[in-house]
Image (cartoon, helix red, strand yellow):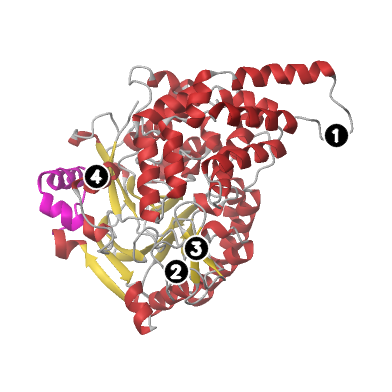
């Protein structure tokens, strides 16, 4: 059977290679193509991995899973399984071959055939693999030097591929030499101009809203792309999606977002500003929806500035952010331009427009020697295939961050960094964080907090600037990952309120507010409530990164305390039950360190 399938695949590949222009291929060209295909199809490793390898068996299991929880467990298992490393590194050399042989239209047909093997009667495989495989070939075709397959396997597997001895060979040598140009010349007390009489203030953190414009009140649902459920008109479905959200939904109803804005207007009208860390419209990629959401925020919260960033689900295809230097039409230019227009019309000065149109970033200068620096960490995101090219520092985010931090230090300003993917988590490629950690170490006196989204769970992340997460002295910064508004998987919509020390600009207290969607569905009324505040549950908020490090060590020693934190991070929903394994997964996000 496997040889038959490979023969069909080879025949389809050859058929796909027929020229689409008027010129006919010469017999010599066709023979050359057949030889190349023979090399691919005749490779025993390729055949074994394609049809009988454990990773592809896991893919079959994934597409046949019944619930989003089962799919999530399988998908996490695929990348944590050591067999992934062997499979990934074995298949990596075929990417440039297939990218050379197949035009874009033919690649789509190959994906369709693969999915007939993996999911004969389903509707999940084609869109899922299209989001992963087709952009991979596009990057290979349009990047100088192609992809670094070895490094991609290492990063996607959370550094299980390759040894520590071989990984440093993959560093960006020139970036290593040139990134940090100046030495710290003043200590914190001399350099910083924080005012002792500055008052504390409130900041709201929204993230990962994932609005779905197709989500209608009490609609039926069916499982489609990825691990989530989408609305359907079919009343034969056994899934009824609630009025204000559903645990496995691909997105959130627009009315739930509007109820949040109304709630903020009533309860938090005294907030100094809002940070919104990406994935607003989610999978819809609807420009009108994106504009409508930003307009609704501006119209209903006219006295609260909002400082947004872009998320990986805001792009089409999802996750793919080519750097401005890429030799291809940039599929996110429309997003940058739309963001620049809306953000500068409502919240940012006109001077921010060029940098937003460049890569979606900007700097905001606020009173009392304070500034917000946004960075586009999608240029470090491990599922953005463009980060595995030979181009160091894609999008020049590290270089720009260095310049902005140096300018802040020269002015004596304190800084908050805001982005979507947290650099010190497994979602960011290790080489990017390796260089980012050098900047954090150099400017640790200036950086007083980092704020991100993407993870969906509410968690903090201690940024260590060396290779040892147990080294208290290397804890130089703390990142706060906000809870998502999106309910996937089994989460109540939530957001964070920080109290910021007016003098030091460090986080002084943390509140998490949430909406119980089951209660809202029963009553028909969304009732946003405070889930907890840090001081009441855990005592005083640590005031320095090293004290946050101490808190992590305490969590490791005290399972009861870890259980409390885990349940709060998951918004206490019954489907997100505690286990030591899940606690360890959360701890992995609490400790960021250099893996090179």
Q: Taking 351 as reference, is 533 above or below it?
A: below
Label 2 packing within 10 angstroms: few (<14), some (14-19), many (20+) = few
Q: Which residues are magenta?
A: 539-565
Disc 2 from disc 1: Cα separation: 48 Å
Q: Nearer the viewer, mark 1 or mark 4?
A: 1
Q: Residue at x 57, y 60 (%)?
A: 284
Whether pointer 3 and pointer 1 mark residues with C-beta atoms closer than 8 Å, the reply is no
| Nearest to N terminus: mark 4 or mark 2 | 2
Work out which residue is located at the far right of the displayed protein and give it: 22
| Nearest to N terminus: mark 3 or mark 4 | 3
Residue tagged by mark 1? 21
Q: Secondary structure at mark 4?
A: helix
Work out which residue is located at the far front of the displayed protein and give it: 1
Label 3 packing within 10 angstroms: few (<14), some (14-19), many (20+) = some
Residue tagged by mark 3? 222
Whether pointer 3 and pointer 4 mark residues with C-beta atoms closer than 8 Å, the reply is no
Disc 3 from disc 4: Cα separation: 33 Å
Q: Residue at x 64, y 46 (%)?
A: 331
Residue 559 part of the magenta segment: yes
Disc 4 from disc 2: Cα separation: 36 Å
Q: Nearer the viewer, residue 399 or 112?
A: 112
Q: Secondary structure at mark 2?
A: loop
Whether pointer 1 and pointer 4 mark residues with C-beta atoms closer than 8 Å, the reply is no
| Nearest to N terminus: mark 1 or mark 4 | 1
Residue tagged by mark 2? 238
Q: Quadrant of residue 533?
A: bottom left
Residue 511 shows in the view: yes
**Residue 587, numbered circle:** 4
Q: Quadrant of residue 325?
A: top right
């Amino acid at each position: 059977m496997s040889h038959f399938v490979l023969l069909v695949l080879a025949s389809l590949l050859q058929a796909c290679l027929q020229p689409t222009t008027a010129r006919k291929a010469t017999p010599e060209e066709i023979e050359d193509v057949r030889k190349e295909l023979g090399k691919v199809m005749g490779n025993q490793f390729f055949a074994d991995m394609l049809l009988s390898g454990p990773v592809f068996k896991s893919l079959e299991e994934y597409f046949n899973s019944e619930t989003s929880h089962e799919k999530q467990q399988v998908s996490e298992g695929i990348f944590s399984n050591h067999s992934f490393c062997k499979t990934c590194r074995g298949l990596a050399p075929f990417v440039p071959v297939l990218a050379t042989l197949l035009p874009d239209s033919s690649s789509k047909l190959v994906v369709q055939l693969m999915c007939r093997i993996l999911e004969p009667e389903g509707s999940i495989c084609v869109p899922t693999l299209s989001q992963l495989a087709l952009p991979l070939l596009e990057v290979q075709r349009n990047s100088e030097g192609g992809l670094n397959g070895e490094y991609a396997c290492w990063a996607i597997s959370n550094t299980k591929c390759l040894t520590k001895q071989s990984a440093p060979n993959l560093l960006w040598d020139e970036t290593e030499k040139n990134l940090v140009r100046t030495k710290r010349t003043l200590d914190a007390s001399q350099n910083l101009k924080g005012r002792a009489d500055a008052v504390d203030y409130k900041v709201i953190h929204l993230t990962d809203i994932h609005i779905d414009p197709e989500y209608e009140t009490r609609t039926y649902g069916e499982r489609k792309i990825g691990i989530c459920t989408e609305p359907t008109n079919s009343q034969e479905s056994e899934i009824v999606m609630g009025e204000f959200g559903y645990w496995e939904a691909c997105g959130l109803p627009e009315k739930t977002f509007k109820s949040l804005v109304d709630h903020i207007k009533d309860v938090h009208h005294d907030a100094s500003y809002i940070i919104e860390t990406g994935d607003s419209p989610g999978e819809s990629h609807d420009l009108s929806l994106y504009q409508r959401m930003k307009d609704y925020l501006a119209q209903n919260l006219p006295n609260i500035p909002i400082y947004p960033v872009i998320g990986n689900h805001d792009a089409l295809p999802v996750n793919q952010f080519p750097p401005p230097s890429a030799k291809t039409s940039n599929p996110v230019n429309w997003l940058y331009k739309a963001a620049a227009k809306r953000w500068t019309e409502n919240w940012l000065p006109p001077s921010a427009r060029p940098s937003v149109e460049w890569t979606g970033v900007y700097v905001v200068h606020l009173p009392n020697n304070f500034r917000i620096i946004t960075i586009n960490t999608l240029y470090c995101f491990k599922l953005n295939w463009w980060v595995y090219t030979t181009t160091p520092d894609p999008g020049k985010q590290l270089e720009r961050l260095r310049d902005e931090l140096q300018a802040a230090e020269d002015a004596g300003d304190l800084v908050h960094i805001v982005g979507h993917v947290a650099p010190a988590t497994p979602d960011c490629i290790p080489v990017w964080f390796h260089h980012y950690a050098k900047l954090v170490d150099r400017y640790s006196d200036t950086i007083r907090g980092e704020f991100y989204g993407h993870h969906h769970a509410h968690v903090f992340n201690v940024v260590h600037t060396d290779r040892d997460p147990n080294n208290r002295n290397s804890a130089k910064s703390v990142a706060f990952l906000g809870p998502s508004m999106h309910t996937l998987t089994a989460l109540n919509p939530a957001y964070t309120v920080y109290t910021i020390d007016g003098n030091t600009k460090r986080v002084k207290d943390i509140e998490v507010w949430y909406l119980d969607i089951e209660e809202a569905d029963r009553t028909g009324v969304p009732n946003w409530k405070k889930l907890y505040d840090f001081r009441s549950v855990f005592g005083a908020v640590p005031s320095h990164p090293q004290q946050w490090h101490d808190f992590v060590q305490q969590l490791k020693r005290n399972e009861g305390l870890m259980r409390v934190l885990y349940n709060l991070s998951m918004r206490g929903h019954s489907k997100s039950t505690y286990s030591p394994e899940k606690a360890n997964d959360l701890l992995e996000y609490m400790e960021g360190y250099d893996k090179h």
